[in-house]
Amino acid sequence: MDDALTEPEIVTLTADHMHAAAEIRRVALWQRLPWLPDVHTPEEEEQYWRMHLLPNFSILGAATGNRLVGVIAYGDNWIEQLYVLPDFQGKGIGSLLLGCAKEEMDEIRLWTFQRNVGARAFYQRHGFTAEEETDGADNEEREPDVLYHWRRLPERTPGLQPSYG
């Protein structure tokens, strides 16, 4: 039997999924960055997804079978959240979710922590460039962060040649 991961199904998340989405964020973030302070309870995080993210952003999930394994919340040229469960990282799920956002936006900004080396490498592989670094004074965790930016390149028009005159 082939144990290779089949491509996950991308689904639009609803209020029924917000508990699972918030849990994916907690598990993925604290496995990658265990030193971060835990500034919100699981219940507060779920409420944030339900009351802030859901009404204001597109939220998609990556599902394998009946299990949600990755989430992205995006809109208005920002990615607010992008997390994949640790056991499913490195399998193209984050790239698939990011690709959905890139299809809908011509320009994207996002914040990640400076010490999140894996996330920084991921975004740089996908064409994002670091635009600003901070000391973390403006985020809840007080952790130095970095603002990344991506912009869609204009499509080339076939047959047009540059004018030199």
Image: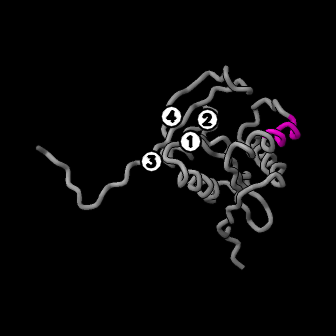
Q: What is the magenta range?
A: 41-48
Scheme by which the image is coloured: one colour
| Residue at image point 49% right, 47% down | 106
Marks 2 and 1, how far apart in space? 12 Å
From the viewer's perspective, is the residue at label 4 or at label 1 nearer? 1
Q: Which residue lies furthest to the left in this view?
A: 165
Marks 2 and 4, how far apart in space? 9 Å
Q: Callout 2, which amino acid?
A: Trp
| Magenta span contains residue 46 | yes
| Residue at image point 67% right, 54% down | 89
The residue that label 4 is drawn on is 130
The residue that label 1 is drawn on is 77
Ranked by sequence position, the earlier of labels 2 and 4 is 2
Residue 132, compared with residue 74, is above or below; it is above
The image shows residue 140 at horizontal and vertical percentages of: 74, 26
The residue that label 3 is drawn on is 152
Ranked by sequence position, the earlier of labels 3 and 4 is 4
Q: Residue furthest front?
A: 55
- Judged from the image, the secondary structure of the residue bearing numbered disc 1 is loop
Judging depth in this view, the residue of 133 and 164 nearest the camera is 164
Ranked by sequence position, the earlier of labels 3 and 2 is 2
The image shows residue 153 at horizontal and vertical percentages of: 40, 48
